[in-house]
Image (spheres, grey):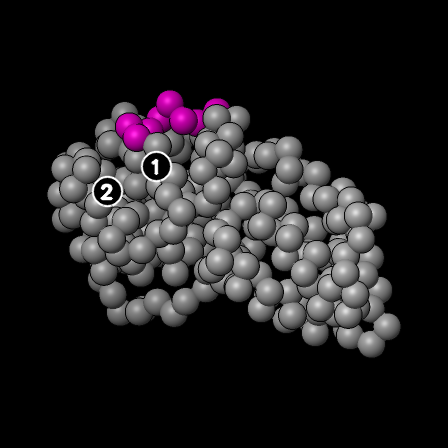
């Protein structure tokens, strides 16, 4: 039976958060705080980032701002132009929007597109996400490309209405419990959870292991065994 498969992008189709993690590690090492260890600085950064994303949304520039704010909070001084230049230098891969597809993604999408309808649903800063989609080389496999500032129940409900989807035959596929799995289930869709070891800490949430509407896979290529 032909079904609709909605795919998350960051850390489902291509590597994303691991790039941010590398920048954070380089930043903390460079900061060389005289009294705070790595864990303490990371905890402060997480708090700053949680506040900034809630206020300003997502994207590389918001992330760099969170690093600068963390510097100011931990060193108790304003970030200088030299500080900001160094932080930006750590994040060249992010600012240039390089995209590295996750293993098995291209061939799996090619096969799935022959027997199902594929949609893409990603959240973030619109221009940045669309550039990543463009350079990924896989946009042609999707019937529609959707970039939203946040993924919540109403976003999924709106997509169902806009695309005239049958929830019983529609699956949301992603790595984020918070954005991909839980709100999709609340909107009446089925879901496929493919964990990523580098999933952003702000995307973590508890899933119901007994939920029959959630299929759990270890890797992307296993989708071909079920669809």
**Near-viewer residue (98 or 117):** 98
Q: Residue at x 31, y 61 (%)?
A: 182
**Near-viewer residue (33 or 169):** 33
Q: Is residue 213 toward the left or the right of residue 24 in the image?
A: left
Q: Residue at x 30, y 35 (%)?
A: 119
Q: Secondary structure at mark 1?
A: strand
Work out whether 194 lies above or below 130.
below
Q: Position of residue 219 (x, y in %)?
A: 44, 48
Q: Is residue 42 toward the left or the right of residue 203 in the image?
A: right
Whether residue 29 is visible here, answered yes or no, is no
Instruction: Identify the residue position indicated by label 1 in the image.
Output: 146
Q: Which residues are magenta?
A: 136-144
**Label disc, if present, on residue 180 of the rendered structure:** none
Q: Position of residue 174 (x, y in %)?
A: 39, 49
Instruction: Identify the residue position indicated by label 2 in the image.
Output: 159
Badge 1 vs badge 2, beta-carbon distance below 8 Å: yes
Q: Residue at x 14, y 48 (%)?
A: 168
Q: Secondary structure at mark 2?
A: helix
Q: Residue at x 53, y 63 (%)?
A: 50
Q: Is residue 80 toward the left or the right of residue 130 in the image?
A: right
Q: Position of residue 209 (x, y in %)?
A: 32, 69
Work out whether 178 lies above or below 156.
below
Quarter holding the C terminus? top left
């Amino acid at each position: 039976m032909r079904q609709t498969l909605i795919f998350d992008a960051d850390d489902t189709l291509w590597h994303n958060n691991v790039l941010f993690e590398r920048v954070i590690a380089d930043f903390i090492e460079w900061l060389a705080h005289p009294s705070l260890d790595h864990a303490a600085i990371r905890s402060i950064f997480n708090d700053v980032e949680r506040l900034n994303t809630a206020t300003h949304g997502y994207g590389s520039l918001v992330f760099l701002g969170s690093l600068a704010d963390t510097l100011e909070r931990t060193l108790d001084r304003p970030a200088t132009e030299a500080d900001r230049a160094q932080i930006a230098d750590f994040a060249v891969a992010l600012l240039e929007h390089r995209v590295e597809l996750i293993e098995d993604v291209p061939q799996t999408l090619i096969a799935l597109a022959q027997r199902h309808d594929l949609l893409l649903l990603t959240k973030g800063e619109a221009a940045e996400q669309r550039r990543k989609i463009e350079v990924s080389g896989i946009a042609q496999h999707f019937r529609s490309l959707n970039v939203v500032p946040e993924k919540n129940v109403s976003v999924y409900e709106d997509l169902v209405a806009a695309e005239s989807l049958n929830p019983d035959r529609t699956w949301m596929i992603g790595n984020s419990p918070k954005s991909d799995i839980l709100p999709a289930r609340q909107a009446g869709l089925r879901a496929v959870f493919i964990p990523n070891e580098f999933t952003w800490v702000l995307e973590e949430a508890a899933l119901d292991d007994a939920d029959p509407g959630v299929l759990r896979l270890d890797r992307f290529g296993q989708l071909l065994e079920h669809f």
